[in-house]
Image (spheres, rainbow, N blue to C red):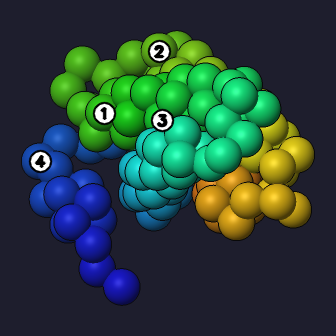
Amino acid sequence: MPTTVNDLLRTYPADLGGVDREAMARCIEECLRCAQACTACADACLSEPTVADLTKCIRTDMDCADVCTATAAVLSRHTGYDANVTRAVLQACATVCAACGDECARHAGMHEHCRVCAEACRSCEQACQELLAGLG
């Protein structure tokens, strides 16, 4: 299915340096999806009666949302591409997604928003790992 991310990658006038455009598009989309899920989960946690028990979850959600947003932005810029920067950003994103996925999974049995967020984190982590593997 065509997406704006795919459309923009397809119309980029220069070579992407051998990077798989589909993997790049998937990773950008997963980063944006995860950032939204983490932002919504943090907000939902703030509305829970047991908010004091969710402090680490809220903090991890917020960190993950910020890193995912930054990763999507870095991946969306191709002019003057530096593979070392891209690798570092993808590794950081995969790391924070794993941590957030673990934290949200701890609360998933009690809070559905944490279950949904953990799933988004796992999917984003996988997309980052797949793109990293393709960078060589």
Residue 73 shows which numbered tag?
1
Q: Secondary structure at mark 2?
A: helix
Residue at image x 80%, y 38%?
103
* Place of residue 61 in the rendered image (x, y in percent of width and height, measured from the top left): 59, 35
Q: Is residue 73 left or right of residue 23?
A: left
Along the line of sight, the residue nearer the viewer: 110 or 24: 110
Q: Amino acid at mark 3?
A: Ala
**Real-space Cα distance between discs 3 and 4?**
30 Å
Find disc 3 in the rendering and name its residue: 65
Find disc 2 in the rendering and name its residue: 85
Mark positioned earlier in the residue sequence (3 or 1): 3
**Real-space Cα distance between discs 2 and 3?**
19 Å
Q: Amino acid at mark 1?
A: Ala
Residue 8 shows which numbered tag?
none
Mark positioned earlier in the residue sequence (1 or 4): 4
Is residue 75 visible in this depiction of the protein?
no
Q: Are marks 2 and 1 in contact (CB under 8 Å)?
A: no
Mark positioned earlier in the residue sequence (2 or 1): 1
Q: Amino acid at mark 2?
A: Val
Find disc 4 in the rendering and name its residue: 13
Q: Residues within 10 Å of mark 4 (few under 14, many from 20)?
A: few
Mark positioned earlier in the residue sequence (3 or 4): 4
> Which of the two discs, 3 and 1, sits closer to the camera?
3
Total labels: the figure holds 4
Determine whether 21 is above or below 70 in the image: below
Mark positioned earlier in the residue sequence (2 or 4): 4
Is residue 113 visible in this depiction of the protein?
yes
> Which of the two discs, 3 and 4, sits closer to the camera?
3
